[in-house]
């Protein structure tokens, strides 16, 4: 009979309960009847009954077992449970010692559990055991295994650590598509899809290009959300939409002549002010990779305003002159002049001309009048987004307005 001689433990019935575990492992549970039931359970003595966790079944120094014959001890059999139990059927207390096959290498405790989620992607749960402090080198999100031809990535791992043994639970997951939205038009008028990838980013949907990326679980098994734009929307001109925009119709600068008395004329400026109004506008949007398509020469954009010079020689040969600038005014003519008669009177802007001298109203300004015409007031290309491949896109907006005619 096998005995633990240091504390006089006798194995009940001369043999343990033996369970054959998966993957070549065993579990042995011994029920031992101790001689010294009065003091053996004392704190100073209990270690003689129950060895340290991890003690080998055949380690005579640690657990003091003796066997009547060779070939009794199992390889790598380590203590995982020890205690003193009351066995009611026997009406006595027995020392129980349980051993399992454990090494410093991870060994699967059971076969894989294979599941498939709603999206059809495979997931494997794998449970392994080893001695405490066994190294683990797999990396979440990087390490892979092959399961019947399917590549699985380590999605998560958990190690339950006890003094007796460590239990490793691994989750291995197939990379693939988790979800995909139906095409929808975004605020930028581009049709788009949103695809969520698990583990590894897949191929873009047919006819779409990647526009933005959001990655969760960056340091582990990632979830990648990609927004895709419909390629054809990036190269078309969208239908125009109608709106109203404020516009200031430029004032006008001209001259006119008035009769002050018989044979007397006064040539003077005639100025009308700018008029603010609302104009019907047609706005056309498009996307381009070439910002140079903007046709700035076609945009209505006066680069100077009207300037007026009035000059001449008055009575007693006294000169007069004035200059003025009229912002947001156009010139309807280049002006006029007048020569003072030797007999009679002639005026320029209320100034009487000296006989035989000439006075001038000189008008210089833009002559194009937008009133009653259709003009382009805006053609610009602003950076709007950059695709995942690095292509920079610009949003080109061309605004055309119908300017009302002037009141006669």
Image (cartoon, rainbow, N blue to C red):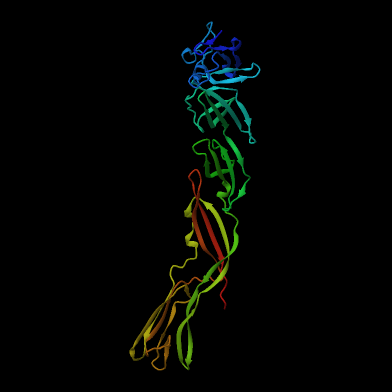
Query: Residue 370 or 105: which is nearer the viewer?
Result: 105
Which residue is found at the position 66% from the left and 17% from the top?
A: 89
Query: How far across and down, in percent of the image, does residue 261 sit?
Result: 47, 93
Along the viewing direction, whichever of 180 and 400 lies nearer the viewer = 180
The furthest residue to the right = 89
Q: Specify whether 98 is left or right of 321.
A: right
Number of marks in the rendered image:
0
Which percent across, then down, holds residue 211? 53, 46
Say which quadrant the C terminus sits in. bottom right
User: Which quarter shows the N terminus?
Assistant: top right
Q: Is residue 263 above or below residue 322?
A: below
Residue 336: percent from left, percent from top: 44, 81
> x and y percent of residue 230 in the render?
58, 46
284 to 27, vertically: above or below = below
Asked if residue 157 is positioned above or below residue 299 in the image, the reply reads above
Measuring 54% from the left and 40% from the top, which residue is drawn there? Answer: 224
Residue lying farthest to the front in this orientation = 38
Residue shown at the point (56%, 30%) measured from the top left = 172
Front residue of this view, candidates 175 and 140: 140
Work out which residue is located at the far left of the displayed protein and give it. Answer: 317
């Amino acid at each position: 009979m096998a005995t633990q001689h240091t504390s006089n433990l006798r194995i009940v019935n001369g043999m343990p309960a033996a369970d054959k575990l998966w993957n070549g492992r065993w579990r042995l549970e011994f029920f031992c009847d101790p001689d010294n039931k009065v003091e053996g359970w004392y704190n100073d003595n209990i270690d003689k009954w129950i060895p340290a966790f991890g003690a080998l079944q055949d380690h005579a120094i640690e657990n003091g077992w003796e066997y009547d014959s060779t070939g009794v001890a199992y390889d790598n059999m380590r203590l995982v449970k020890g205690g003193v139990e009351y066995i009611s059927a026997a009406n006595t207390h027995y020392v129980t010692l349980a051993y399992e096959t454990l090494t410093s290498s991870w060994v699967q405790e059971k076969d894989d559990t294979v599941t498939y989620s709603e999206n059809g992607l495979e997931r494997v749960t794998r449970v392994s055991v080893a001695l405490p402090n066994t190294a683990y080198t797999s990396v979440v999100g990087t390490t892979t295994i092959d399961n019947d031809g399917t590549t699985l990535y380590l999605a998560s791992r958990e190690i339950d650590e006890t003094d007796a043994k460590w239990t490793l639970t691994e989750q291995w997951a197939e990379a693939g598509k988790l979800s995909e939205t139906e095409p929808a038009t975004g605020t930028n008028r581009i049709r788009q899809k949103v695809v969520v990838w698990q583990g590894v980013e897949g191929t873009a949907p047919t006819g779409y290009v990647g526009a933005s990326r959001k990655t969760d679980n960056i340091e582990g098994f990632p979830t990648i959300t990609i927004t895709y734009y419909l390629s054809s929307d990036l190269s078309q001109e969208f239908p125009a939409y109608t709106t109203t925009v404020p516009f200031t119709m430029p004032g006008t600068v001209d001259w006119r002549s008035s009769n002050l008395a018989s044979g007397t004329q006064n040539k003077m400026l005639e100025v009308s002010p700018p008029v603010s109004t609302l104009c019907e506008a047609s706005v056309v949007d498009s996307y381009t990779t070439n910002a140079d398509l903007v046709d700035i020469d076609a945009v209505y954009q006066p680069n100077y305003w009207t300037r007026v010079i009035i000059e001449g020689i008055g009575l007693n040969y006294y000169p007069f002159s004035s200059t003025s600038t009229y912002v947001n005014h156009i010139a309807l003519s280049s002006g006029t002049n007048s020569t003072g008669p030797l007999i009679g009177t002639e005026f320029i802007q209320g100034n009487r001309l000296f006989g035989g001298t000439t006075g001038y109203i000189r008008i210089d300004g833009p002559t194009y009048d937008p009133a009653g015409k259709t003009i382009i007031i805006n053609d610009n290309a602003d950076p709007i987004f950059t695709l995942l491949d690095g292509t920079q896109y610009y949003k080109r907006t061309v605004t055309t307005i119908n300017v009302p005619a002037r009141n006669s």
